[in-house]
Amino acid sequence: MTNGKSKKAKKRLLIVASVVIILAIVITGLNLISLQNLLKKGEAYSGLEIKNQLTPQKDENGYWYFTTDEDFKIMHLTDIHIGGGFLSKEVDEKALNAVATMITKEKPDLVIATGDIAFPVPYTAGTFNNYSGAKAFGNLMESLGVYWTVTFGNHDAECYSYFDREAVAEIYSDEEFKHCLFQAGPEDVDGYGNHVIEVKNSDGLITQAIVLIDSQAYVKNNLIESIKGTYDNIHPNQVEWYKNEIKRMNSENNKTIKAIQGDVNGGLHKDYGTVKSLAFFHIPLVEMNDAWTEFQENGFKDTDNFKYIEGIIGEGGRKVYCGLGEDDLFETMLELGSTKAMFNGHDHINNTTFEYKGIQFSYGYSIDYFAYSGIDKQGSQRGCTMITCKPDTTFQIDKYNFYSDRYDLEGFTREEVTMQFEDVTYQAVVD
């Protein structure tokens, strides 16, 4: 009798194991097919004709730089969230289409994506493979033929993903991505993707430095912290790296000033002696939350420190989801006087820009069709930021919604969405 029960139990176990194996094989096959289709989708867009397209070069420090005496246009994208699995096929294609449409219209000199390019969450995407999202985005950018780089977000290499941050950095560093200016950064500095891109004029003066920083992911790289959302900060040795890079560029500019006019303290020193810079990363600094709290507590009116410019905080609870602890990056920026604006993503419904203690904080419009429930049917948060860097070291920020007439382009489609914050004042949104 016992022997009979044992045989039946073994038989049931064998059936369950067989079903699991068959399901795994089917899912693997579906994901392979989905990956191939996604990569082909990224490659299907035509290359852009960009008049007088700038071509970057590498300097003696190994950093990329552009040379121009005209405006330099940067497109900031964030939170593209490509699932890369068989369950996310439709939304992944929409994300690629949105990116391609806006780049085709704007024809930027440089595209910067600040993290969460991939979103390989298995129960929604059907895969753990974060290679798919990174590769599909890279294929798209190369097909369009624009120069681009990225910073990492918290989802680009989750603890359960197939590839860690180092491996994803190798994907973006691959020679097949000829227009990608991503650099993994110094080995003795935490994170991957700490790098600098410079814009110089024909005299060799740096008119704008673009500083890209890995804002890390979670305080501990495990599933519990991922679920809880205990986000990490930019680390002390990254702040030191930032400080040293600003000082290096200041020194180089002052040598160039002296060579041009024979006196480092002459007329050029005022504009170029301290290099002007813009910083890009994924997770907002705690000071962004401090600033927003100050604005809220003052009845959504400007303070001596805070100046509202545009946009909304639309996340649940009207919150800024910053890193858990403090870092010294903002204080270092104030001390050095170089960085005049910071651009981040992470909070998909937040797209505000404001100035705090003389430095602008700017959320990017997100692309996300996938990570937030129902977000594919909403549209107020989707779009891009255009940053125009002027030859005189000033800059201008313009934000464009994907569903505006600006992106009504022949050959591209846009889905019907609800503009959840359409035609309301900021005050009406936050009340």
Image (cartoon, rainbow, N blue to C red):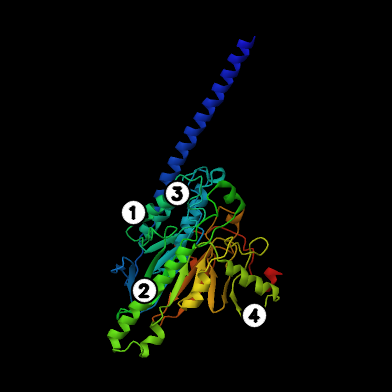
The reply to whether dot 1 and dot 2 touch (C-beta < 8 Å) is: no
| Residue nearest the viewer, comparing 13 with 255 | 255
Choose mark 1 or mark 2, whichever is in front.
Answer: 2
Disc 3: which residue: 164
| Image-quadrant location for residue 357 | bottom right
Q: Residues within 10 Å of mark 1 (few under 14, many from 20)?
A: few
Q: Residue at x 68, y 62 (%)?
A: 317
Q: CA distance from mark 1 to mark 2?
A: 28 Å
Horizontally, residue 16 falls left or right of residue 253, namely right
Q: Amino acid at mark 4?
A: Thr
Q: CA distance from mark 4 to mark 2?
A: 35 Å
In the picture of the structure, the residue carrying the numbered disc 4 is: 303
| Residue drawn at 41 percent across, 44 percent down | 36
The residue lying at 51 percent from left, 53 percent from top is 155
Q: CA distance from mark 2 to mark 3?
A: 31 Å
Badge 4 crowding class, 10 Å Cα cut-off, few under 14, some 14 to 19, many 20 or more, is: few
Residue 415 picture location, percent across and down: 55, 57
- Viewer-proximal residue among 413 and 39: 39
Nearer-N-terminus badge (2/3): 3
Q: Which residue is mark 1?
A: 174
Residue lying at 47% horizontally and 33% vertically, measured from the top left: 25
Q: Earlier in the sequence, mark 3 or mark 1?
A: 3
